Image (spheres, rainbow, N blue to C red):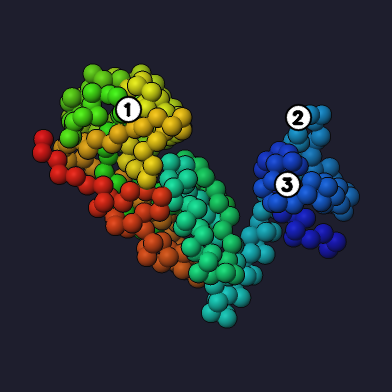
């Protein structure tokens, strides 16, 4: 065998990004190094892996798509050698493929990942950010070891370790008359313009809050991007419902948003760690789950105002 695991990793990164430039940024490796590695692989395997498009990046050939699947399996097997060695030596090491729900990632992942790799210096975390459905699919395909998401629609075949509960609340702009309320009900909101977080599972969760009361909200805008929604709310386009509560009350344009408690008894979203059910988890995954349990709770969530800190007495 006259190719290396490193060259295979360069091939995977280029295939997933469709660009040597983006692969270079992802891996912090120079573009010539990646280009040379791919050329070497193509020569060694006597197979064209990519079609080069002028000014439009790269696309995989049929052979390249087939070999990409095998390349990922090869890297996983190589990483598994580290896992086995760590279990034999009782040392935590290796790379953890970690997914995180897109609405949680910007707040939770930086501090959580840094604290884990600081506690276990021989580990690395490869992060994937996606929506709930895609995270479950990647876990099923063994592209991820574990993921941080909500407890909504977790099917049989998965384990879910709960960490913290996030009740829903209303988010409005600073100038909105609703911002002066001590709390507000869904009935009072039903004729107000709703800017809906349009992500799989999340949108169903928020709409079900209304359906449970026989209400139908007035949806004026939908977006899968949380920051876009916060900025629209801050500019007076309407209100939104959220579970996460960032420590900053500023939208991306510097305008302020205000959190108003939602009166009534509503099902919270529960943050947790989800993984495939299996007879035995690797020691690396087990230690990461323990770290999450010690690091995330109702009393503390990285990047957020924790539930116990954000609760106010609701009189309505």
Q: Residue at x 58, y 75 (%)?
A: 86
Residue 167 picture quarter: top left
Q: Residue at x 37, y 45 (%)?
A: 247
- Whether residue 298 is visible here, answered yes or no, is yes
Residue 58 image point, x, y percent: 76, 36
Residue 291 picture quarter: bottom left
Q: Which mark is residue 173?
A: 1
First in sequence: mark 2 vs mark 1:
2
Left or right: 306 as drawn, with respect to 72: left
Q: In this picture, is 251 found above or below 20?
A: above
Mark 2 touching mark 1, by CB under 8 A?
no
Q: CA distance from mark 3 to mark 2?
A: 16 Å
Residue sitting farthest toward the bottom: 89
Residue 43 image point, x, y percent: 89, 50
Q: CA distance from mark 1 to mark 3?
A: 40 Å
Q: Which mark is residue 24?
A: 3
First in sequence: mark 3 vs mark 2:
3
Residue 242 image point, x, y percent: 33, 37
Label 2 sits on a secondary structure element that is loop
Quarter of the picture containing the C terminus is: top left
Mark 3, Cα crowd under 10 Å, few <14 / some 14-19 / many 20+, is many
First in sequence: mark 1 vs mark 3:
3
Residue corresponding to mark 2: 56
Q: Which residue is nearer to you in this view: 53 or 257?
A: 257
Residue 252 image point, x, y percent: 46, 33
Quarter of the picture containing the N terminus is: bottom right
Q: Residue at x 71, y 54 (%)?
A: 9
């Amino acid at each position: 065998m006259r190719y290396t695991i490193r060259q295979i990793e360069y091939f995977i990164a280029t295939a997933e990004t469709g660009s040597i430039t983006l692969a270079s940024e992802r891996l912090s490796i120079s573009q010539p190094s990646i280009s040379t590695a791919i050329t070497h692989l193509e020569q060694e395997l006597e197979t064209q892996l990519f079609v080069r498009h002028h000014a439009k990046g790269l696309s995989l050939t049929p052979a390249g798509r087939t070999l990409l699947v095998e390349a990922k399996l090869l890297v996983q097997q190589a990483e598994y050698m580290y896992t086995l060695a760590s279990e034999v030596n009782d040392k935590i090491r290796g790379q953890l493929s970690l997914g995180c729900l897109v609405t949680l990632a910007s707040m939770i992942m930086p501090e959580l990942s840094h604290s884990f790799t600081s506690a276990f210096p021989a580990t690395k975390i490869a992060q994937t950010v996606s929506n709930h459905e895609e995270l479950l699919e990647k876990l099923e395909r063994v592209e991820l070891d574990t993921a941080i998401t909500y407890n909504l629609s977790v099917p049989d075949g998965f384990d879910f370790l709960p960490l913290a509960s996030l009740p829903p609340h209303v988010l409005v702009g600073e100038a909105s008359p609703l911002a002066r309320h001590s709390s507000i009900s869904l009935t009072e909101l039903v004729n107000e313009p709703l800017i809906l977080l349009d992500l799989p599972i999340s949108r169903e969760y928020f709409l079900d809050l209304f359906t449970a009361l026989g209400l139908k909200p007035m949806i004026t805008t939908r977006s899968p991007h949380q920051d876009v929604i916060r900025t629209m709310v801050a500019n007076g386009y309407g209100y939104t419902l959220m579970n996460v509560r960032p420590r900053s009350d500023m939208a991306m344009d510097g305008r302020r948003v205000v959190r108003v408690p939602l009166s009534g008894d509503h099902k919270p979203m529960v943050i947790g760690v989800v993984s495939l059910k299996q007879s035995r988890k690797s020691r690396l995954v087990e230690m990461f789950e323990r770290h999450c349990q010690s690091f995330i709770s109702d009393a503390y969530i990285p990047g957020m105002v924790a539930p116990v800190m954000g609760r106010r007495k609701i009189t309505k």
